Amino acid sequence: MTDLPTPDHRRPDGVDDATVEAVGRLTEALETVERARGHLYSFHQLTGEADFKLGDAADQLREAGHTRLADRLEREIVGRNVIGGRWTFQLTEEYDDTYWSAVRAAEREVREALVGGRRHLAEAELKEQRRTPGHPDHTATPGE
């Protein structure tokens, strides 16, 4: 048994430090875009949850005898667009179609072209620099 990273996490022959660094930075950018996308989906779900609570509040106002205010809340707020002509699901779809998918494709293209498609190569090398060889909690791969 070897104490080396798997071939998927080893630098291909002929790839220099600057290339590994640049591809790593691009991957970091993609990870940030993924986080932003997650926040956008949280925004989408929270806004939808708020809309249902607003509808509940309108129902409760009506039951409490405040029909005029309940009607106004339902007419003006419940189901309202968050920006011109769009609900949040439309924002997530547009983000996915115009930005997220383009960044993912660009990151993959660069990885394929420069480092044989290897993912997290810079981080794999960082792991090798920081681990203690022979220590049971610092193995290169699972199952060693």
Image: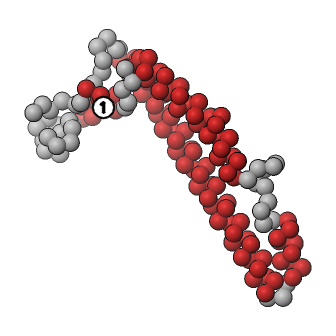
How many numbered marks have been drawn onto this rendered protein structure?
Answer: 1
Tell me the quarter of the image containing the N terminus. Answer: top left
Left or right of residue 39: residue 13? left
Left or right of residue 8: residue 19? right
Residue 122 shows in the view: no
Residue 33 shows in the view: yes
Whether 90 is drawn above or below 13: the answer is below
Report the residue at 84% width, 88% height from top. 65
Circle 1 packing at 10 Å, graded few (<14), some (14-19), many (20+), is some
Q: How is the image coloured?
A: secondary structure
What x and y, as percent, mark residue 80?
A: 79, 60
Name the residue nearer the viewer: 60 or 19.
Answer: 60
Report the residue at 73% width, 53% height from top. 87
Q: Tell me the residue that label 1 is attached to.
A: 124
Report the residue at 59% width, 30% height from top. 102
Name the residue nearer the viewer: 15 or 56.
Answer: 56
Q: Give the residue type at disc 1.
A: Ala
Whether 99 is drawn above or below 64: the answer is above
What x and y, as percent, mark residue 35?
A: 52, 44
